[in-house]
Image: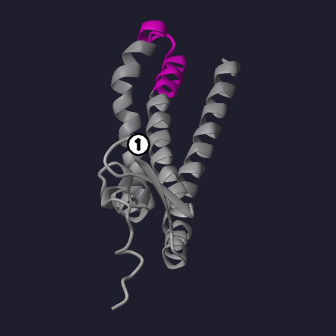
Amino acid sequence: MIESSVSACPVPDEQQPLNEYQELTESWFFSWGKLDPIKYSRKLAWVWAWSWLITGPLAAASFAPNKHLLQFILCSSAGAGIALVLTLLRLYLGWSYVRERLLKETIFYEESGWYDGQTWTKPTEILTRDRLIVSYQVKPILQRLERTFAILVLIVFSGSLIWNLL
């Protein structure tokens, strides 16, 4: 009986790129990238709205809403945007890490601790499978996150133009 390359893999289960990918897809937070556009937008709007609880009072201390409403809104929105950017950055870093692990021909892993690192070269069939996962599953998520960053940059740029016109 011929042993398959997957069963001969010396990498511990939790460090195998395919399992790391599966873990992200099942994670409460990282699965946001796979949601349909409406649910994805709602999650981001939820983060942004809850961030107002912190940034609203801070902006009100500088710009009284009853006197400087537009400055208050712009300042609060920008502050809440920071939490949104940090959230998106965490999503992006998690998915890009898994992308890199799936794309690499050799995988670095630790058997029992930081002091005994090893490398394993993926067989062709596993490398092909992993690269297909990147192409059809991970890449669209990263592209969505990049588009979201671009939209946020446009919003910040628009806000700064409005601020300068005041």
On the question of residue 65 being in view, the answer is no
Query: Taken as a whole, is the magenta stretch helix, strand or loop?
Result: helix
Q: Quadrant of the N terminus?
A: bottom left
Residue 11's place in the image compared with 131, above or below, is above
What number of labels is visible? Answer: 1
Residue 165's place in the image compared with 37, above or below, is above
Residue 79's place in the image compared with 103, above or below, is above
Magenta region, residue range: 60-79
Label 1: how many residues lie within 10 Å, few (<14), some (14-19) or many (20+)?
few
Q: Quadrant of residue 87?
A: top left
Q: Residue at x 38, y 29 (%)?
A: 51
Q: Which residue is mark 1?
A: 45
Q: Relative to 129, is 25 on the left or the right?
A: left
Residue 98: x and y in percent read: 47, 55
Q: Quadrant of residue 105?
A: bottom right
Residue 36: x and y in percent read: 41, 62
Type of amino acid at the residue the image marks with label 1: Ala
Residue 103: x and y in percent read: 56, 62
Q: Nearer the viewer, residue 11 or 136?
A: 11
Q: Quadrant of residue 161?
A: top right
Q: Residue at x 41, y 35 (%)?
A: 48
Q: Nearer the viewer, residue 165 or 2?
A: 2
Q: Residue at x 65, y 25 (%)?
A: 160
Label 1 sits on a secondary structure element that is: helix
Question: Is residue 54 a member of the stretch shown in magenta?
Answer: no
